Amino acid sequence: MSLPALGAAARRSAAHLLMAHQRSLGVAAPASGASAASPALRRRRRPFSSVAEAADDAALAKALADAAAANAGSVVNYTAAWCGPCKAMAGPMAALAKQHPSVSFIKVDIDSAALQQSVRAAGVTAVPTYVVRKGAAVLETIQGARLELLQKAVEQAAAAK
């Protein structure tokens, strides 16, 4: 087998393994429609469908206000389509969202014109940035793809009221 053919075969094999793993986690099926909490928050139509995506500043503000009113946990993931570490953290974020259904996970694209006010208000200077809240209180702000810190903060946010 030639080297280019081996590369293509390895890529196909990796893709098949990833799809099988996603099916075993139950995240492979795309979600239909928008979130019941806010029509402007949309579920991704990709394997990582347990993380809502804010369409604009008003939708993000409403989602955070709803979480604060319920004294629930929330994680706002400030990200960008061009960011490699952001892409690498998409899978672990979906897994955390699946493990902690009481916590709202919201993705914010820092390049979206409709979300610029929220990005500025949060003081985002690097991506990925995660703002973890319990109710209205900010528990932790994490810059970078630091999964261990994010896991601990999400567990804190998910803790009993």
Image: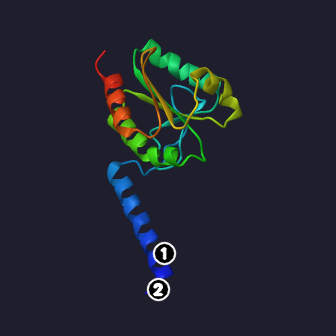
Q: Amino acid at mark 1?
A: Ala
Label whose residue precedes the other's in the sequence (1 or 2): 2
Q: What label does residue 8 carry, if any?
A: 1
35 and 78: which is toward the camera: 78
Picture layout, residue 98 above or below residue 104: below
**Colouring used for the render:** rainbow
User: Percent from the top left, x then y, of residue 135?
Assistant: 42, 15
Q: Residues within 10 Å of mark 1 (few under 14, many from 20)?
A: few
Residue under the point 46% across and 45% down: 90
Residue under the point 32% across and 37% down: 99
Residue that mark 2 sits on:
2
Q: What label does residue 153 carry, if any?
A: none
45 and 107: which is toward the camera: 107
* Secondary structure beneath label 2: loop
**Which of the two discs, 1 and 2, sits closer to the camera?**
2
141 and 72: which is toward the camera: 141
**Residue at the right extreme of this rendering:** 113
Relative to 12, 159 lies left or right: left
Residue under the point 40% across and 48% down: 27
